[in-house]
Image (cartoon, rainbow, N blue to C red):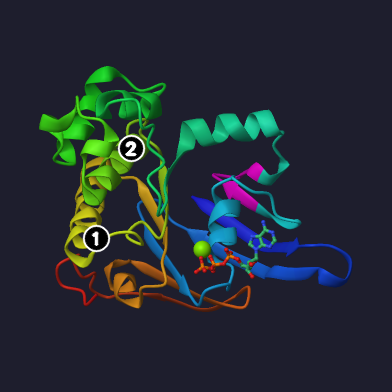
């Protein structure tokens, strides 16, 4: 589904120029659950942003079903993201003056009303649609951002440290919702984390170090959010 070939990325210029990604290649299959792990600064977020079309590499290709998104114009890339990918970050980025229903509907964009309301119910917030983000707990706000990301039926869900701001119990709950929703809606997951325990939930684990992939393996058995350590 996604074929990533020989990605490189540099930051800075002149003396301070340095290479963040040093030739990354990998294939992501439909409905895979990929977790990318590695030390802080190893290039995980940069790679995630390039695969998802938020950033451009300096060289290499990122093909979705043979379509290389690195060759798209800015406008085409924006359209591509709108139609194909969803994002969840450590911060929730909810609009503070809009209620939950409106926040998720904004994310829905092209999708139909019925669907986005169902997703709010799916993340257990059916009774909180009229509340403002500030009236919810951290875990509830992250579940709203999950609903918002999924409201437009993305083919791929990208997550960068989605539990980074959550305590253990809440973090497990959010991860559990994400897995449950994947079984129901069949999207592909690509998640970045430095929590090695979370890698045990993945189908495919990618380890990174200093801008390179050092190891790729499949878990024989995927653990649930409640079986992993924290
Ligand atoms: N926009 C930028 N400009 C310059 N340097 C950057 C930029 N973004 C990231 N970097 C640098 O690139 C390197 C890799 O950053 P990246 O955010 O991809 O790492 P990471 O693996 O996600 O780390 P963390 O686990 O701390 O989030 C770091 O040294 C970082 O300082
Ligand atoms: Mg990061």
Question: What element does badge 1 sit on?
Answer: helix
Q: Quadrant of residue 72?
A: top right
Rendered view: 19 above or below 88: below
What's the residue at 66%, 28% (across, down)? 75
Task: Give the CA distance from mark 1 to mark 2.
Answer: 18 Å
Which residue ends up furthest to the left in the rendered image? 127
Question: What element does badge 2 sit on?
Answer: helix
Question: x, y (%) of residue 178?
Answer: 26, 51
Question: x, y (%) of residue 49?
Answer: 57, 52
The residue indicated by pointer 2 is 150
Residue span colored magenta: 62-69
What's the residue at 58%, 60% (across, down)? 47
Q: Nearer the viewer, residue 88 or 128?
A: 128
Q: Residues within 10 Å of mark 1 (few under 14, many from 20)?
A: some
The residue indicated by pointer 1 is 171
Question: x, y (%) of residue 80?
Answer: 56, 34
**Mark 2 residue's CB less than 8 Å from ligand 2:** no
Q: Nearer the viewer, residue 53 or 66?
A: 53
């Amino acid at each position: 589904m996604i074929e990533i070939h020989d990605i490189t990325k540099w930051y800075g210029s002149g003396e301070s120029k340095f290479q963040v990604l040093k030739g990354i290649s990998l294939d992501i299959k439909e409905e895979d659950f990929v977790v990318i792990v590695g030390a802080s600064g190893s290039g995980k977020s940069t790679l995630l942003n390039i695969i998802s079309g938020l950033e451009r590499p300096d060289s290499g290709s990122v093909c979705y079903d043979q379509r290389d998104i690195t060759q798209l114009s800015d406008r085409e890339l924006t359209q591509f993201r709108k139609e194909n990918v969803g994002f969840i970050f450590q911060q929730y980025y909810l609009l503070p003056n809009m209620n939950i229903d409106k926040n998720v509907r904004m994310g829905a964009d092209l999708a139909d009303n019925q669907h986005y309301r169902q997703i709010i119910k799916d993340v257990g917030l059916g009774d909180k649609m009229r509340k403002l983000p500030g009236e919810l707990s951290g875990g509830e706000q992250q579940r709203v951002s999950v609903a918002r990301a999924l409201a437009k039926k993305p083919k791929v869900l990208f997550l960068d440290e989605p539990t980074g701001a959550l305590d253990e119990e809440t973090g497990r709950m959010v991860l559990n919702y994400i897995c449950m929703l994947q079984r129901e809606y069949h999207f592909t997951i690509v998640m970045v984390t430095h929590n090695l325990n979370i890698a045990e939930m993945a189908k495919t684990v990618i380890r990174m170090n200093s801008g390179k992939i050092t190891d790729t393996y499949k878990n024989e058995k995927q653990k649930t959010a409640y079986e992993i350590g924290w």
